[in-house]
Amino acid sequence: NMEEGSGIQDDEVFKLAPFNPSSDQIQEKALELLKLSADDVLFDLGCGDGRLLCSAAEKCPGLRCVGVEVDPVFATRAKERAEKLPSDVRSRIDIRLEDVLKIPMTT
């Protein structure tokens, strides 16, 4: 069964981009540019192994982080990475196994 007009089989995993982890330097620069605070929520759509979210949560006390990953292997890795962090950091990270293209976006 194909999704109408998409040419993609229902059972295929749709991938927007391959996993290509960001270097520590790139992550540092991104976090610097974002100027995150405890009042923010950082969403990482296609979070891979969660490295950016975990780094951000460690560096910015109070910051809440939500990662969405379609690949169960990487979602599991992200959850495992977050589980290794201290409980006060870990509690602010939410990793979701979902397809970002299928999440309802309402206002």
Image (cartoon, grey):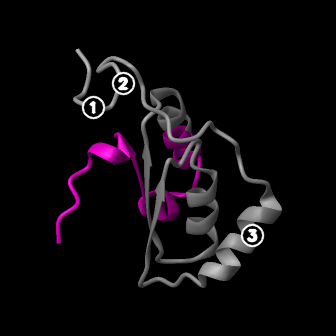
Asked whether residue 106 is drawn in magenta, I would say yes
Q: Residues within 10 Å of mark 2 (few under 14, many from 20)?
A: few
| Total marks in image | 3
Please name the residue that numbered disc 2 is placed on: 8
Question: Is 22 or 3 nearer to us in this picture?
Answer: 3
Across and down, in percent, residue 70 comes to 42, 36
Q: Is residue 54 left or right of residue 9?
A: right
Q: Nearer the viewer, mark 1 or mark 3?
A: 1
Going by the numbered disc 3, the residue's amino acid type is Glu
Q: Earlier in the sequence, mark 2 or mark 3?
A: 2
Residue at disc 1, secondary structure: loop
Asked if 101 appears above or below 3 in the picture, the reply is below
Question: Is 28 or 11 nearer to us in this picture?
Answer: 11
Q: Quadrant of the N terminus?
A: top left
Q: How far apart are the two marked residues, 2 and 3, measured between alpha carbons?
A: 36 Å
Q: Nearer the viewer, mark 1 or mark 2?
A: 1
Start-end of magenta stretch: 78-107
Going by the numbered disc 1, the residue's amino acid type is Gly
Q: Quadrant of residue 43?
A: bottom left
Q: Quadrant of residue 23?
A: bottom right
Residue at disc 2, secondary structure: loop
Residue at x 58%, y 53% (from the top left corner): 85
Q: How far apart are the two marked residues, 1 and 3, measured between alpha carbons?
A: 40 Å
Q: How far apart are the two marked residues, 1 and 2, measured between alpha carbons?
A: 8 Å
Q: Quadrant of the C terminus?
A: bottom left
Residue at x 27%, y 44% (from the top left corner): 102
